[in-house]
Image: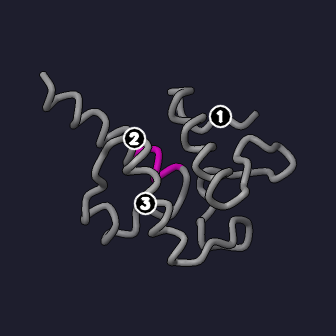
Amino acid sequence: MNIFSKDTDINVRLNNIFKNRFCINLFNNELDININDNLLGRKFKLKPRDLIYLLYDIEKEFDITISKDDIDNIKFNTISNIIKIINKELQQKDMEVV
């Protein structure tokens, strides 16, 4: 099993999004997933419009809003960057509650 985030819940939920939306199991060791592989590259083969669906699914699943800055600065392009964005938004959300 590939480990992408220290938070197992994020790993499982993100994997479910990829499985349901793109039929990609991030935990499949045969795929040799590298968290720094570009989602639009040869391994994932996603199309730009797929990133829009992914954005929507992540915002819905984690109840967060991904900032325009994270999208404009090409940060929403790898599993690693997406995990960082999710963690950042969840931390900000937790701070707002306090």
Q: Position of residue 14 (x, y in %)?
A: 55, 44
| Residue nearest the observer in this picture, 47 or 81 | 47
Q: Residue at x 47, y 44 (%)?
A: 83
Q: Residue at x 62, y 58 (%)?
A: 21
Q: CA distance from mark 3 to mark 1?
A: 21 Å
Start-end of magenta stretch: 80-84
Q: CA distance from mark 2 to mark 3?
A: 11 Å
Q: Which mark is residue 22?
A: none
Amino acid carrying mark 1 in the image: Ile
Q: CA distance from mark 2 to mark 1?
A: 19 Å
- 91 is higher (above) or lower (below) than 51: above
Q: Residue at x 54, y 34 (%)?
A: 5
Q: Which residue is mark 3?
A: 55
- 8 is higher (above) or lower (below) than 14: above
| Residue nearest the observer in this picture, 7 or 25 | 25
Q: Are marks 3 and 1 in contact (CB under 8 Å)?
A: no
Task: Please rate how many residues cluster around mark 3, counting C-alpha atoms within 10 Å: few if below 14, some from 14 to 19, many from 20.
Answer: some
Magenta-colored segment: predominant secondary structure: helix
Amino acid carrying mark 2 in the image: Phe
Q: Which mark is residue 3?
A: 1
Identify the secondary structure beneath mark 2.
Answer: helix
Q: Position of residue 49 (x, y in %)?
A: 51, 77
Q: Which residue is mark 2?
A: 62
Q: Nearer the viewer, mark 2 or mark 1?
A: 2
- 18 is higher (above) or lower (below) than 68: above
Identify the secondary structure beneath mark 3.
Answer: helix
